[in-house]
Image (spheres, grey):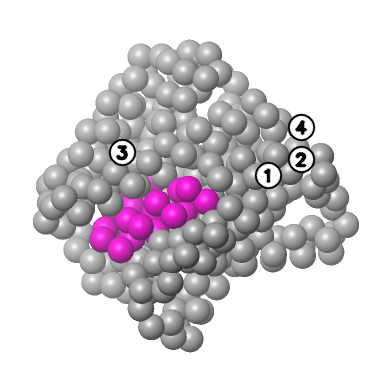
Amino acid sequence: MRSADLIRLLILAAIWGASFLFMRIVAPVLGAFWTAEARVALAGVAMLAFMLMTRRNMDFGKHWKQYLMLGILNSALPFSLFSYAAMTLPAGYSAIVNATSPLWGALVGALVLGERLTARKMAGLVIGVTGVAFLVRLGPVAFTSQVLLAALACVGAAICYGIAGAYSKKKSAGIAPAQMATGSQLGAALVLFPFAAASPATGTVTPFILLIAALLALLCSAVAYFIYFRLIADLGPTRALTVTFLIPLFALAWGAIFLGETINANTLIGCALVVLATWLVVFQSAPAPVSVPDKVGS
């Protein structure tokens, strides 16, 4: 791997790790729906402006159904669920559960696309679920019904990413990644707006909260997407997925540094189990067709 690609990989992992920190700050004030809406709307507008400036045709009339469906599966639902979880769980918890997305992608691929569910993938699924259960039950945050609900919301978000990958492979193969990324953000913004409008902010909206919300949208979605697509072009989809292993580490670090979140041995054990499970699923021992994932971060 070239040094430039390694730097991009680390920057992307740091950015996507920071998204969980930003949600942890913004969601208790804006609420889950407005946090998700602000993220996709600002990102979508910024990405559309870039597409127009570079004279890339979005083909809304032709692809609007795919933009809308992928926007729901890949952004509207998971961002809302992670934002809900951020009102309870530390940033590192959510990032670790997010890293199970490739595991659910493998399961959905087997159920929907007829892909082979190998013993290696099955082992990965079992280890991954064990890692999440270990973290939630024995991590530094006291186990309560609210913690359980928040963790299940994160699992639901990760499953959404798995479904989105299968949908993209089946229905959106002919659409350029930059088009799909931009269109899906705009589609998610349209879907989320009625829910956000009916859900007033739960706290005082300060300039600092607005700044963090803007960073969540422009840095963690718009900029991150384009870095990720560059990595896919330079490294291929499988090697680009190595960012999945780094995101939880950055999220844990940012949470500890900026929010004073606790990291103990059980946190690291749960994280290690999930990372191992993801490695088992992502990097197969024999060559196999790999679809370009639409999203591995948050």
**Could you tell me if residue 158 is visible in this image?**
yes
Q: Are marks 2 and 3 in contact (CB under 8 Å)?
A: no
Label 1 SS: helix
Expressed as whole percent of the image width and height from the top left, the position of residue 223 reads 62, 61
Residue type, mark 4 in image: Gly
Q: Is tag 4's residue or tag 2's residue first in the polypeptide sequence?
A: 2
The furthest residue to the bottom: 207
Residue 174, labelled with which disc? 4
Q: CA distance from mark 1 to mark 3?
A: 30 Å
Residue drawn at point x = 19 percent, y = 63 percent: 262
Residue marked by disc 1: 67
Q: Is tag 4's residue or tag 3's residue first in the polypeptide sequence?
A: 4
Among the 4 quarters of the image, the one containing residue 171: top right
Mark 3, other Cα within 10 Å: few <14 / some 14–19 / many ≥20: many
Residue type, mark 1 in image: Tyr
Residue type, mark 2 in image: His
Residue marked by disc 3: 274
Mark 4, other Cα within 10 Å: few <14 / some 14–19 / many ≥20: few
Mark 1, other Cα within 10 Å: few <14 / some 14–19 / many ≥20: many
Residue 63, labelled with which disc? 2
Q: Of circles 1 and 4, which is in front?
A: 1
